[in-house]
Image (tube, rainbow, N blue to C red):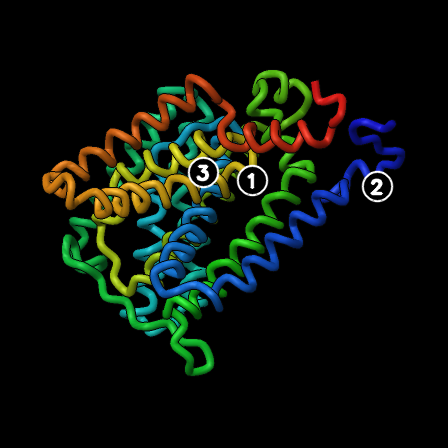
Amino acid sequence: MISGIFHTTYEKDMALRRTHAQKIRIVIVIVFLLVFPFLANRYALTLANQVGIAVIGAIGLNILVGYTGQISLGQGGFMAVGAYTAGILTARFGMPWWASTIVACFTTALIGTIFGIPSLRLKGLYLAIATLAAQVIILWVVTHWSALTGGVDALVVPDPKLFGIKINTDFNFYWVTWGLVGIVTIAAVNLFRTHFGRAFIAIRDQDIAASVMGVDLFKYKLLAFAVSSFLVGLAGALTAHYRNIVTWERFTVDVSVLYLAMIIIGGLGSVTGSYLGATFMTLLPVLLTNLGRAVKTSFPLIDSILPFVQQAMFGLVIILFLIFEPEGLNKIWKNIKDYFRLWPFSY
């Protein structure tokens, strides 16, 4: 009896989906995503769009933190760059939403690369503080450059349209968001099948050894910041076009911590972990809110303490994962798959 997976050719070993079970699972996921918007209500579609945007941002951050080992606390600031760039170009210069989104991605990549320069000399907590400084600097510019961003006032973005059709309705934007999620996922997975991705991983594992083997640390560290910021800028631009309103309050340091929690809970160095973490951390507050409403009749004071309960649960979940499963939800999912893959010799 065969137990486990054995490959006899390089093509099978390098395939994205190596087993029939993996191919079946991906088909099931695709079918679910195609059918879901026709069965879901507006509230569920709103949550799905939020999850999709979060997945894009989490994949971008995971490329930098999980795959390259460069910690970042500037996620909220870089999302602000993408959102404000897309919003300003569309609202004040009349640029089409799709063109402003592309420009926003490259602008954020440029800003991310500039703030990534300290990574050439800094590591660990020192780099975290440097990226936190980027967060503070970006928000300071946003709130004080009133002539361009509007300062603390909200920036109103026109409705994005495609062939005369308004696309920021929940149903229409679902296809835009999850279509881009699919493109980003394929690009990220294939990135680490190239020498660029392998250089990122080598830097994460041991940057000195990678340098000795010929990896240009200056080039690849900055490239990691650029690629990560590109995707984060995409998430910010999508937020601007979906919400129609851009305000600095959406991109505070809390957002940076939230995205860092997504990839920690989902699993560092894993695209699947980015999906799981983004979904979990986006839906957790919703589940707590619905639970609070359900017990409101029995506990009338729940409304006043619910925000504090959400913050406490947020911190508790992170602590529990760091203690009991540091590799996150992706490791739990791998354990489940390995159990059935190796059955009946799963021990």
The nearer-to-camera label among 1 and 2 is 1
The residue nearer to you, when weighing 162 against 316, is 316
**Badge 3 vs badge 1, beta-carbon distance below 8 Å:** no
Q: Position of residue 3 (x, y in %)?
A: 81, 27
Q: Mark 3 sits on what residue? A: 277
| Residue at 72% in and 43% down | 21
| Residue at 38% in and 66% down | 170
Look at the numbered disc 3 and give the secondary structure of its residue: helix
The image quadrant where one finds the C terminus is top right
**Badge 1 vs badge 2, beta-carbon distance below 8 Å:** no
Give the CA separation, mark 1 to mark 2: 22 Å
Q: Position of residue 327 (x, y in %)?
A: 51, 25
Look at the numbered disc 1 and give the secondary structure of its residue: helix
> Which residue is situated farthest in the bottom direction here?
164
Left or right: residue 12 versus residue 24 is: right
Q: Is residue 242 visible?
A: yes
The residue nearer to you, when weighing 197 against 43, is 43
Left or right: residue 339 versus residue 55 is: right
Q: Mark 1 sits on what residue? A: 272
Against 259, is 250 above or below?
below
The image quadrant where one finds the N terminus is top right
| Residue at 67% in and 27% down | 339
Q: Position of residue 266 (x, y in %)?
A: 48, 34
Q: Mark 2 sits on what residue? A: 11
Q: Residues within 10 Å of mark 2 (few under 14, many from 20)?
A: few
Give the CA separation, mark 3 to mark 1: 9 Å
Q: Position of residue 182 (x, y in %)?
A: 57, 55
| Residue at 30% in and 27% down | 315
